[in-house]
Image (cartoon, rainbow, N blue to C red):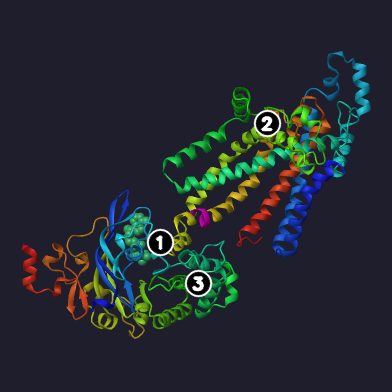
């Protein structure tokens, strides 16, 4: 089985289970809501893909001349362009592109060995997944716990520090923050590697199954590889996760403080329930409901952050792939990556909405 | 007679610090709540009833502060307890039922969990099964089917939720229940049922209830005694029958005359002159004197104390003090 198929299963099976659960247990309203969302999402992805298609062709430069460089003669360029179908009428190219999106085959790269995009993504996508999953978990843990802590210590030193943290970290450029971490932990202290996913030598011993290296190392019991992967993960995860945590700190803090004013908190206090429990139990649970919505909204920012983080840390994921192929004017690759990102954003925010409806007993679509 | 007093409030003052200045929403109030009675606390909106009710559990947060007073509950002064000790009293010995049952239950917590959490907070050693059984028996006693314990608050009607609030106040067999306008948001029929329930609970459990309301009719229906507040002060306290048959304080007289009465044969409803004073700048002396039809010279100078006018019927009004006392007050 190819890695991309395994990844598809890893993402697909839980999503399908979630959907199945909703369709069996959920109300008719919820079912209709999900169908509507899916139906509305498809034209959005279509419009986005179309925009990318035309913008790429308006940009100066093209894949063939940037691959050949100055030594390419006009005749060579023309013959390769014809081979790749770039001399076909735009409308024909557009039709071909749409068909490749619908069938999810994405076509072949226009540069290098002209490999199928699917094969290239099956190496790159797992790397991105390996980065964004721990980064999101870190952002949520720091954000939600920090926000609740700030609310509990409202108007005291810890609260002010956390508020400053949330504003500062949110406004830091990822490039700069990643670079600082690299300089400090990588160059100065020499504790952690600053680029790549795994040590080059240890990497040769790793048998890849899913291309999610940490998972592969676990599955094959390759401990040296596993620890090497973890070491390489620390700095990129910190960069992306901490920068995203700022907005969660703010949201959680505000929502917990607001919820603490609610009547049911006063009523619970009148039953002798302690302040700690009121904040971390009652108020936080209610405050999480709007925060969950925020997770859905942050998915796009998460992916954009991943692109930058991957570039800083030479992390061979979808983001650095996208940047490489934009400069090579590899139309097919860029179109495909952006379409996949769009589908991912749509899928995750739909999943978040469904989870929301399961968490909040009052939500009825 | 002191042994049958459950809660003795002495010289209680509660202050809100606001940007406009500090407001005494409860000003030097003394009141006794007797064991096993339903005491109605009435007064116009904003006179400090809720503030007083919350102060009895030291529930104030934010701008409110108890600046003076003693709160003798069942033989000990709650003012001497630390902030860590207070939660043990709340819910276990004194329960509270709030005005709006729609917002007083946690929307993401099942009814059952409200009850078991309260039980476990005060009795951590109770097993989950035992807590559940207790919750079931309690709500069934209050007329809620036990299956409904698995519901969320939004699935219940207002009347049902108010019963849930009562069950929460009773989960630990509290001696005193403070009910702050518990029926204001209910319709008349549900209200009547709820008041019947309060009566039954009082008899069955020997429960003491402080019933805060601005609805004189509710007090007439269920209360044993009534306390009347005006502008942060207590103006009259007595047996419901005595106070209603023969109100002493001119404010109480006006209040009773302004209640719509079915027996009233078409006559104009009495409307008291003036408006309640701002608590930010209360009038000197008796706070009711600017609106009082019987105001005398002393009323605007000196505050009358709350004293017995007849046996067991207290009022704070100069009309019932003899001249000697008035004179003494003026000179002293
Ligand atoms: N949070 C607050 N901040 C400042 N002042 C307050 C606050 N809450 C109440 N007050 C003041 O305390 C006074 C008494 O309020 P309280 O809620 O105790 O009145 P009440 O008798 O319960 O009125 P109602 O019948 O409307 O419930 C109000 O007039 C108001 O001036
Ligand atoms: Mg009130």
Residue B152 x %, y %: 58, 67
- Marks 2, 3 in one chain: no
Seen in the image, is B284 located left or right of residue A75? left
Q: Marks 2/3: CA distance?
A: 54 Å
Q: Secondary structure at mark 3?
A: helix
Seen in the image, is A206 located left or right of residue A260? right
Q: Chain of mark 2?
A: A
Classify 10 Å Cα crowding around label 3: few (below 14), some (14-19), many (20 and above): many
Instruction: Check the picture and name the quadrant holding the N terminus of chain A.
Output: top right
Residue A88 x %, y %: 91, 30
Q: Marks 1/3: CA distance?
A: 20 Å
Q: Chain of mark 3?
A: B
Res. A163 visible in picture = yes
Ligand 1's image quarter is bottom left
Q: Secondary structure at mark 1?
A: helix
**Residue positioned 20% across, 69% down in the render:** B292
Q: Nearer the viewer, residue A215 or A3?
A: A215
Instruction: Check the picture and name the quadrant holding the C terminus of chain A.
Output: bottom right
Give the residue at mark 2: A308
- Marks 1, 3 in one chain: yes
- Marks 2, 1 in one chain: no
Query: Residue B302 colored magenta?
Result: no
**Residue positioned 57% across, 31% down in the render:** A172
Residue B233 x %, y %: 25, 65
Q: Chain of mark 1?
A: B
- Circles 2, 3 touching at the beta carbon (< 8 Å): no
Residue A16 x %, y %: 77, 54
Give the residue at mark 3: B164
Instruction: Compare marks 1 and 3 and give the one earlier in the sequence.
Output: 1
Q: Which residues are magenta?
A: A279-283
Q: Nearer the viewer, residue B123 or A365?
A: B123
In this rendering, the label closer to the viewer, 1 or 3: 1
């Amino acid at each position: 089985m190819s890695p991309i198929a395994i990844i598809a299963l890893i993402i697909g099976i839980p999503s399908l289970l979630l959907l199945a659960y909703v369709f069996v247990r959920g109300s008719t309203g919820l079912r209709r809501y999900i169908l509507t969302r899916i139906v509305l999402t498809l034209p959005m992805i279509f419009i986005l893909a179309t925009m990318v298609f035309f913008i790429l062709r308006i940009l100066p430069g093209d894949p063939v001349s940037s691959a050949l460089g100055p030594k390419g003669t006009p005749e060579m360029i023309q013959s390769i362009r014809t081979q790749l179908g770039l001399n076909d009428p735009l409308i024909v190219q557009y039709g071909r592109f749409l068909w490749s999106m619908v069938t999810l085959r994405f076509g072949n790269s226009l540069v290098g060995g002209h490999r199928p995009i699917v094969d290239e993504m099956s190496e790159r996508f797992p790397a991105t997944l390996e980065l964004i999953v721990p980064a999101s978990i870190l952002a949520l843990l720091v954000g939600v716990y920090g926000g609740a802590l700030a609310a509990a210590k409202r108007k005291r030193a810890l609260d002010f520090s956390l508020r400053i943290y949330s504003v500062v970290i949110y406004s830091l450029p990822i490039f700069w923050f990643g670079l600082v971490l690299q300089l400090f932990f990588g160059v100065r202290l020499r504790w952690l590697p600053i680029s790549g996913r795994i040590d080059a030598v240890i990497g040769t011993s790793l048998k890849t199954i899913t291309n999610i290296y940490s998972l592969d190392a676990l599955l094959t019991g390759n401990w040296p590889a596993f620890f090497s992967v973890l070491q390489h993960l620390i700095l990129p995860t910190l960069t992306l996760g901490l920068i995203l945590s700022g907005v969660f700190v703010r949201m959680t803090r505000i929502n917990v403080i607001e919820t603490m004013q609610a009547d049911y908190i006063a009523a619970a206090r009148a039953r002798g329930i302690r302040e700690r429990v009121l904040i971390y139990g009652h108020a936080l649970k209610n405050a999480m409901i709007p925060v969950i919505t925020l997770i859905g909204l942050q998915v796009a920012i998460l992916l954009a952050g991943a692109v930058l983080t991957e570039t800083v840390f030479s992390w061979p994921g979808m983001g650095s792939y996208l940047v490489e192929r934009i400069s090579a004017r590899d139309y097919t690759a860029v179109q495909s990556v952006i379409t996949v990102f769009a589908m991912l954003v749509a899928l995750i925010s739909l999943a978040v909405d469904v989870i929301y409806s399961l968490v909040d007993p009052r939500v009825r679509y | 007679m002191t042994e049958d007093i459950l809660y003795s409030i002495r010289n209680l003052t509660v202050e809100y610090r606001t940007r406009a200045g500090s407001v005494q929403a409860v000003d030097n109030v003394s009141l006794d709540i007797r064991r096993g009675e339903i005491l109605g606390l009435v007064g116009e909106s904003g006179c400090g009833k809720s503030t007083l009710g919350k102060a009895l559990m030291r529930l104030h947060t934010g701008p409110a502060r108890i600046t003076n007073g003693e709160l003798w509950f069942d033989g000990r002064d709650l003012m001497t307890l630390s902030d860590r000790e207070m939660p043990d009293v709340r819910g276990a010995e004194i329960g509270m039922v709030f005005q709006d049952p729609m917002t007083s239950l946690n929307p993401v917590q099942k009814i059952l969990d409200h009850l078991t959490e309260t039980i476990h907070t005060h009795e951590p050693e109770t097993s989950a099964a035992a807590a559940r059984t207790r919750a079931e028996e309690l709500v069934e006693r209050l007329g809620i089917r036990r299956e409904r314990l698995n519901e969320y608050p939004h699935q219940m009607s207002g009347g049902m939720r108010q019963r849930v609030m009562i069950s929460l106040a009773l989960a630990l067999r509290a001696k005193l229940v403070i009910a702050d306008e518990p029926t204001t948001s209910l319709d008349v029929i549900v209200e009547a049922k709820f008041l019947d329930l309060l009566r039954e609970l009082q008899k069955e459990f020997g429960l003491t209830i402080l019933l805060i309301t601005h609805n004189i009719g509710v007090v007439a229906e269920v209360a044993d005694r009534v306390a009347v507040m005006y502008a942060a002060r207590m103006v009259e306290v007595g047996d419901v029958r005595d106070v209603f048959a023969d109100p002493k304080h001119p404010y109480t007289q006006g209040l009773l005359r302004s209640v719509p009465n079915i027996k009233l044969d078409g006559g104009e409803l009495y409307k008291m002159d003036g408006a309640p004073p701002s608590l930010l700048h209360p009038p000197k002396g008796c706070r009711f004197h600017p609106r009082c039809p019987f105001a005398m010279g002393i009323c605007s100078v000196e505050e009358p104390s709350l004293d017995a006018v007849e046996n067991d019927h207290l009022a704070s009004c100069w009309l019932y003090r003899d001249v000697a006392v008035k004179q003494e007050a003026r000179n002293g």
